[in-house]
Image: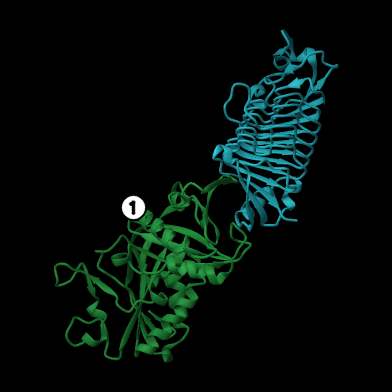
Amino acid sequence: MSALTFTLKQKLQQSINCSALTPDNLVGKTAAEIGSIKLISGKHQLTVADIFDINGNDTQQLCFNNASAGLDYIGANMASGNITIEGDTGAYLGSGMKSGDIHCKGNSAAFAASSMRGGLLTIDGNTGDFLGAGAEGSRKGMLGGTVIVKGNAGDRAGDQMRRGLILIEGNAGDYCGSRMIAGTIGVLGNLGVYTAFNMHRGTLLLKEQPQLHATIQDCGTHTLPFLNLLFKSFSKYNTRFSTLNSLRVQRFVGDTAYSGNGEILILST
Amino acid sequence: MLLNGIQIDDTFAEAFNMRGTRVIITAQNLKWAYHAANAMTGFATSVIGCGVEAGIEREMTAEETPDGRPGVSILMFAMGSKVLMQQLETRMGQCILTCPTAAAFAGIESEDMISLGKHLRYFGDGFQTSKLIAGKRYWRIPVMDGEFLTEETTGMVRTIGGGNFLILATSQPAALAAAETAIEAMKLLPNVIMPFPGGVVRSGSKVGSKYKTMFASTNDAFCPTLKGVTNSELSPEIESVMEIVIDGLTFDDIALSMKAGIEAICALGTNSGVKRISAGNYGGKLGPHLFKLHDILKSSGL
């Protein structure tokens, strides 16, 4: 069996909601049935066959070829299987994802991994704002799972994040970890302003110290054995975070304006 | 049955069901891991008076432990789940939380997970932090030396306690030396502990007593100073008896441990002063698990 491949036929005029194309939804369906699935594009309905050339038959291994930023909601709410994206994706990549594996080889737009609950999402390029934040209407962000971004992330990464792990190998924008409730965000590059704004709990693990606002308090430099557990958990992923080994960190706590007990750990070089 | 000239009685050790758990204790170095583990397993020789029976199972290298520091694993056994949970929490709070640099982790997985640091976290007075790492929940509690790190729960499993054998020798030093040899051999095996001081107990007991308030009393049949006044099990040349008690995760773990201990003693030969090996047989009053000495020694691999 070969991976079920969707190759985008032409440049999109409007974005397409691809949430129907997940391994769970396609299991047991024939190529004809898959081709006739309706997808929403703006106020129109198109079929999968109108938009994609379809090849392969393994519904547990999906591949989007020639993908572009017009493809929204790829892997949304998926609960099993793998999706590989050759190219860029639109917004809401892996939104509400429960399990499985998504690998985007290009960039993704905003709200990637929003309200994600489990599984692994890897983005080789950059991602937009609100990575791992709450999807529309949700009061809580990411609830579990792991996100690895090899490039940069936009603003508000981990906004209202509740649980899980976000690893950003590049830079992150403003308000990283804002309103964070729990979970762990790691950033190896630089950050914008207002990091951990209104942070409640959780951990920001940073390589570079950002400019911190007044209500984030310095608690000194310490050796924290729990980091060993965290680093061990990184080792199973293909990421530069798996090379971290220093337990020595400068610990900032906040956001005290919110009676927050979140922590920003700056790794000692 | 004779093994290298030492008589093995045709009898059995009688053991009973217990609940048990394993905890991995790590620290900055082995010295402090042992301080913590010795405190945690202190006053835990017999459920009769201590609530639990506990001991150090083995040392663990930094590569084997969850947090990459050297440590030891301990096993803890109780007659019921309630007592085990109470004792574990109390000992965690007084012995591990208090010990410099010590941390505690689950050493066994089970459907029944019991609190390790779940309630201890409130010592953090609101400053405690939870981390869910690779599916396991840990608590970080700020303390004066830095942070106390503990896993939230550990597994509770059905186990067996009270496996034993008796060493009958011509003198007290000979009986003790043989017991020490047995303990050294038995410590090499996993999943068992010998909870008494140095692994050896000299006050073996029988069920019941002439006093109504006592449910266990001295095993007079094996007391050498009572040979003439009681229904003694001892022949004239026996002057001292030592007992080794074993708690283990499974029947086979205990049987293997008993076999290793008895064979180590018999390897010493009769010149060591050891004349007989027997076992605590209470006629079926104590428990359902019977460790028949002859069967254990005849089996090759269990």
Image quadrant assignment for residue A215: top right
Can you name the residue that lies furthest to the front here? A214
Residue hosting label 1: B82
For the colour green, the matching chain is: B
Q: Compared to A165, does A16 lie above or below?
A: above
Please name the color used to draw chain A: cyan
Q: In which quarter of the image is the N terminus of chain B?
A: bottom left
Q: Sort mark 1 into few (<14), some (14-19) or many (20+) by Cα contacts within 10 Å.
A: few
Left or right, A109 with reference to B113: right
The chain that hosts pointer 1 is B
Name the spot of residue B218 as percent of width and height, x first.
Answer: 24, 76
Residue type, mark 1 in image: Lys
At a point 75% along the width and 15% down the height, the residue shown is: A48
Name the spot of residue B251 as percent of width and height, x first.
Answer: 41, 61
Can you name the residue that lies furthest to the right here? A10
Residue situated in front as seen by the camera: A207 or A258: A258
Left or right, A11 with reference to A148: right
Residue situated in front as seen by the camera: A175 or B230: A175
Left or right, B248 with reference to A254: left
